[in-house]
Amino acid sequence: MDNMILIDIETQSFNVESGIYEVACLVVENYNIVDSLYLGIPIENYTGVKKYGYGFHNISKTKSEINKFRNLLTNYDYPLVAHNCPFDKKFLDFYEWLDVERDFYCSMRAIRLKEKGMRSYSLGSLISHYNLGAEADHEAFQDVSKLYQLLDIIRPDTWYKVGQQIQKQYSSKKTPRTREELENQYTVSYTLAGEIICFTGKSRFIRSDMQEIAIINGAKISNNIQSSTTMLVVGEDAGSKLDKAQEKEIIIIISDDEFMEMVGDNIIS
C-alpha cells in the first residue's frame, strides 16, 4: 500500500465511553511523510506522567478538533492505518469523527503476515525488536512516529481491510469434532503456530468453530487470560478478560472478524 494515513489515539481506557484525549496522524506517500496532524489540549499545571492521554482534556466531542481531523481526511483520500485498528476505529466511529466511510487497515496484522513467527506483535515489542526504543511511549505523536519507522523498515506487502466480510460458510455444528473431521473441512496450516488464544464476548461466529479453526492452524486454546496467553479474540460485550488483556501489552487483541479474516484462506468452502 503506497499511500496511507497513519493514526494513533490515546483514550485512558479500552471502554469507548472513556473518550479521546490525543490524536496524531502522519500522511505517508511511498513511505515518505508529506503531512502531519496532532490534536491534544494539555491540562494547565498538570504535573503527572503524560501517558494514555492523561494530562490532556477530553476532545471526543470538541468540534474544532474533529473538524481539523476531517479536513486532513478531505485533503488526502487515503486509507487509515492503525496498529490495533479495531480499537482506534471503534472510538472514531462512536464519536463520529469519520463523516464519510473510510477504509481502515491494521498494521499489526500486516506486519504479522510479513514477519511470521515473532513472539509478540504489540507496538512495544516491535519497537524493542527493531531497536527503535525500549517500549511504546503511549503518547500519540511519539507512537505514530514509531509506527511509521516500523513500516518503513518492514514494508508489509499484504493488507486486509478491517470489516471485510469473509465469503465462506462456517459450520453450525457445536460439538467437538475429531482431527480427521476438521482436516476434511479446514486446510492444516501453521498460521497460528505458537499462539495461545483466548476468546471472549458475543460473536456471530460459533465459539467452538473458532476454537477448532485456531487449533487446526497450530494454536492452543486458553479459557482464561494467563501469563502464557498471546492473543485475545474479542466479540461484543467483552468483560473482564478484555480488561486483563489490556494490562498485558504482550497480548495481541483482535476482533472476531479479524480472526476469521486471518485464517480465511485456510478454510475450505
Image (cartoon, rainbow, N blue to C red):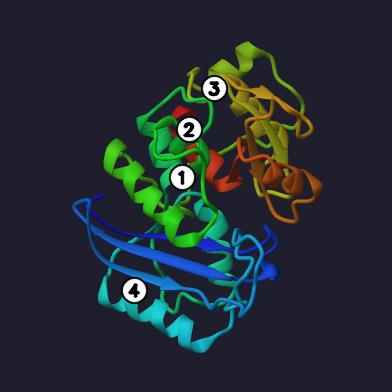
Q: Please tell me which residue is depicted at 68% across the width and 37% down the height of the picture.
A: 172
Location of mark 2 (residue):
269
SS state under label 1: loop
Disc 3 to disc 2, how far (Cα)? 16 Å
Location of mark 1 (residue):
167
Three-letter amino acid code of the residue under disc 3: Asn
Location of mark 4 (residue):
73
Disc 4 to disc 1, how far (Cα)? 30 Å
Location of mark 3 (residue):
217
Mark 3 crowdedness (10 Å alpha carbons): few <14, some 14-19, many ≥20: many
Front tag of 3 and 2: 3
Disc 1 to disc 2, how far (Cα)? 9 Å
Counting residues from the start of the chain, the first of labels 2 and 4 encountered is: 4
Disc 4 to disc 3, how far (Cα)? 38 Å
Front tag of 4 and 3: 4
Point out residue 129 in the picture as x, y percentages from the top left corner: 44, 30
Mark 1 and mark 2 residues within 8 Å of each other at the beta carbon:
yes
Counting residues from the start of the chain, the first of labels 1 and 3 encountered is: 1
SS state under label 2: loop
Mark 4 crowdedness (10 Å alpha carbons): few <14, some 14-19, many ≥20: some
Answer yes or no: is residue 171 visible. yes
